[in-house]
């Protein structure tokens, strides 16, 4: 594959070049794509705006690079193998030619409902081929896709549709998740009753569930596609035209729409994919993420297709019909590169080796991990029982905002160190800072993780609120992108990500803002005030611990049920608290700020060193909370 690094010496050389002359480096990578017009300028930037432009003046369409470009050489090669929820249901294989035709058909359907370049289209769909097709269909005609994970609730969906002012929504009648069928269209309908901006709803058929179709608004997608032409010229896009919006949680307020643009994202998605997975022609690659998250965008849809890869897309869940499903799929398709999240590894590890034993897993060459720190035990298990000590594990650190993998070993090239994401990819210049923003230039240090030079797939703005982008990412430290993570760099220069240093928690690899959760909990009539913190959780990485003050005595059972239901309605099942503790007060400073540090320690069961509590408004609440949580004062 073009631009693939083959040895450690080459990595060191390429990395040094990429830092010494980033523009020449990225221009060289960009040369291998098909452009309608080449760029005038590789990069212009300042982090004050922020205002970052890559490949300015260039014109292209990313789908021509994902699809059309491959047709002559590998039109009949499989692009996507879709493995359905049920293990006995036949899979669907789409060749590059077939995928191209379907993308064009769907693009024509979108056009026929008035979607034009720059319009926002919201995709609220299960992991069915139509989701990947819809993503590309939007890009084909220059519409900006906003994929909303199908596990989000009606209210969360409505907020995202309204924030982006989406004109069209794509959904399905139902979503099959293991033994369950989720009535996706009903949830979408509930959201849509609050979304006057939506003119058309295209509904894919996936279940036998009846769903209401609103005349004049709702259309069956399959029928519309069958009637559409398989020819759709690709819209000409400028390098910096928006490609997509993806909402993610931050430490304050509502989720924000992270914006990625066209050319830079394309170049980096390709470059990081071929290097981190060392994909070779004819390999079968599988990323288990959902397209509703950034991992699915970059490493199910764009990255693999840009590289002309064959990749698996899985509709179901890892534990159904049993905890061997992932391994069965690896054997079934002879998967070579397998990319999943630590939370899945821990969950499957807990089920026992009898679910791994029946499978050979001999096709695997590279194992990947993403989304949260991978603990040593999970790393060792993954290495020994799945990789049979033969497959390098790439622990890939990145974020929705970075668009692609930033720090990761390159398999069979970078010396591995369990729980370390190791080295930055070429073109990526991470640094560690102290609280004042001074760079910790030596090795063997720990600090705040930032990036000091732009990379092609970095976020450009937060949708509709550029100032928020500046405040959250670029104002903490001058001339640096701040990640929100803390990290350590060992004596050899390897990075280990420690976790979030802000009020964001990472539950099963999903980002949730504690403020967002508190706002929902506080909506309940009985709640006076609440504070939410994360605590170590064996399977999920972090669990959600909610401390609540109630207005009047109530049964713990009823309170838990009601709060969980409320969170379910407002955000979705992924955000349900694991523990709810009623307290009579919260540890606050004299200025009224909640000391979350203390709550985090108590929630984690560690009360050894709570620090100075004498400055608190009422130090006795700490004793009460300790007693309530741990049964000891
Ligand atoms: O805290 C880091 C953690 O996930 C956050 C980004 O979350 P999100 O935008 O949802 O993207 C997840 C998938 C790219 C980061 O700020 N994180 C991600 N990967 C790792 C990680 N923490 C430790 N190790 C990783 N490999």
Image (cartoon, rainbow, N blue to C red):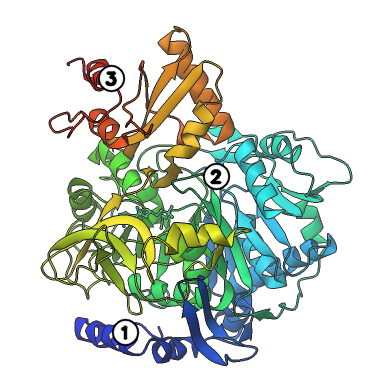
Residue 370 marker:
none
Q: Tell me the residue at 48%/20% (across/down).
A: 528
User: Which residue corresponds to the image point at 72% horizontal and 54% vertical from the top-left?
Assistant: 166
**Vertical order, 389 against 604 (above or below):** below
Q: Secondary structure at mark 3?
A: helix
Is 91 above or below relative to 60? above
- Image position, residue 170 (x, y; %): 70, 51
Q: Earlier in the sequence, mark 3 or mark 1?
A: 1
Residue linked to disc 1: 19
Q: Between residue 18 and residue 624, name the one nearer to us.
A: 624
Where residue 418 sits in the image (x, y, percent)?
Answer: 18, 58
Few, some or many residues within 10 Å of mark 1 (<14, 14–19, 20+): some
Q: Which residue is mark 3?
A: 621
Q: Quadrant of ligand 1?
A: bottom left
Regarding mark 1 in the picture, which secondary structure is present there?
helix
Residue topped by disc 2: 254
Where residue 499 sits in the image (x, y, percent)?
29, 50
Examine the rendering and report whether any part of residue 351 can be seen: no
Q: Are marks 2 and 3 in contact (CB under 8 Å)?
A: no
| Residue 559 in picture, x, y percent from top left | 47, 15
Q: Nearer the viewer, mark 2 or mark 3?
A: 3
Q: Earlier in the sequence, mark 2 or mark 1?
A: 1
| Front in this rendered view, residue 7 or 517 | 517
Within 10 Å of disc 2 (Cα), the crowding (few <14, some 14-19, many 20+) is some
Instruction: Report, in whole angstroms, how far the alpha carbon at label 2 lies from the one at label 1.
Output: 36 Å
Q: Can you say which quadrant of the picture contains the N terminus? A: bottom left
Residue positioned 27% across, 60% down in the render: 436
User: Horizontal placement of 533 versus 414: left or right?
Assistant: right
Which picture quadrant has residue 629?
A: top left
Residue drawn 55% across and 64% down? 461
């Amino acid at each position: 594959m073009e631009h693939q690094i083959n040895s450690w010496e080459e990595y060191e050389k390429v990395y040094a070049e990429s830092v010494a002359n980033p523009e020449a480096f990225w221009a060289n990578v960009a040369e291998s794509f098909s452009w309608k017009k080449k760029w005038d300028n590789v990069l212009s930037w300042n982090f004050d705006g922020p205002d970052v432009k890559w490949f300015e003046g260039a014109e292209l369409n990313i789908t021509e690079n994902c699809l059309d470009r491959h047709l002559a050489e590998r039109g009949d090669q499989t692009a996507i193998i879709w493995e359905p929820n049920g293990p006995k249901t036949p899979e669907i294989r789409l060749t590059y030619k077939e995928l191209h035709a379907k993308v064009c058909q769907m693009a024509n359907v979108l056009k026929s409902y008035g979607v034009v370049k720059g319009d926002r289209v919201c995709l609220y769909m299960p992991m069915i081929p139509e989701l990947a097709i819809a993503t590309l269909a939007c890009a084909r005609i220059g519409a900006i896709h906003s994929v909303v994970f199908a596990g989000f609730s009606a209210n969360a969906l409505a907020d995202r549709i309204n924030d982006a002012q989406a004109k069209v929504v794509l959904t399905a009648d139902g979503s099959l998740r293991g033994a369950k069928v989720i009535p996706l269209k009903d949830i979408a309908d509930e959201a849509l009753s609050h979304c006057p901006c939506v003119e058309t709803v295209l509904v894919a058929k996936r279940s036998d569930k009846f769903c209401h179709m609103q005349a004049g608004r709702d259309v069956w997608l399959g029928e519309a596609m069958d009637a559409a032409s398989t020819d759709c010229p690709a819209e000409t896009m400028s390098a910096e035209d928006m490609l997509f919006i993806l909402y993610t949680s931050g430490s304050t307020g509502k989720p924000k729409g992270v914006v990625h643009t066209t050319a830079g994202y394309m170049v980096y998605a390709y470059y990081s994919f071929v290097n981190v997975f060392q994909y070779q022609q004819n390999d079968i690659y599988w990323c288990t993420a959902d397209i509703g998250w950034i991992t699915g965008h970059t490493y199910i849809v764009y990255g693999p297709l840009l590289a002309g890869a064959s990749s698996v897309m899985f509709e179901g869940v890892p534990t159904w019909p049993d905890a061997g499903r992932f391994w069965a799929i690896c054997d079934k398709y002879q998967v070579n590169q397998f990319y999943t999240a630590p939370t899945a590894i821990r969950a499957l590890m807990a089920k026992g080796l009898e679910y791994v034993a029946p499978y050979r897993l001999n096709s695997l060459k590279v194992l990947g991990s993403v989304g949260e720190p991978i603990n040593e035990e999970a790393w060792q298990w993954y290495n020994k029982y799945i990789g049979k000590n033969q497959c390098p594990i790439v622990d890939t650190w990145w974020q929705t905002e970075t668009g692609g993998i930033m720090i990761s070993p390159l398999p069979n090239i970078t010396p591995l160190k369990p729980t370390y994401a190791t080295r930055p990819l070429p073109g990526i210049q991470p640094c560690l800072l102290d609280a004042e923003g001074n760079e910790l230039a030596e090795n063997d240090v720990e600090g705040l993780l930032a990036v000091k030079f732009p990379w092609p797939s970095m976020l450009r703005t937060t949708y509709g609120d550029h100032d928020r982008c500046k405040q959250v990412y670029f104002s903490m430290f001058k001339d640096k992108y701040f990640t929100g993570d803390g990290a350590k760099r060992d004596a050899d220069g390897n990075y280990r990500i420690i976790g979030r240093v802000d009020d964001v928690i990472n539950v099963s690899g999903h980002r949730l803002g504690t403020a967002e959760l508190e706002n929902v909990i506080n909506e309940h009539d009985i709640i006076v005030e609440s504070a939410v913190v994360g605590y170590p959780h064996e399977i999920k990485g972090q669990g959600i611990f909610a401390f609540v003050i109630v207005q009047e005595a109530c049964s713990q059972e009823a309170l838990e049920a009601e709060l969980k239901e409320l969170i379910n309605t407002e955000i979705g099942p992924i955000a349900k608290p694991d523990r709810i503790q009623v307290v009579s007060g919260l540890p606050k400073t004299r200025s009224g700020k909640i000391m979350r540090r203390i709550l985090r320690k108590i929630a984690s069961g560690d009360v050894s060193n709570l620090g100075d509590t004498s400055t608190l408004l009422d130090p006795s609440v700490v004793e009460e909370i300790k007693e309530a949580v741990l049964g000891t004062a």
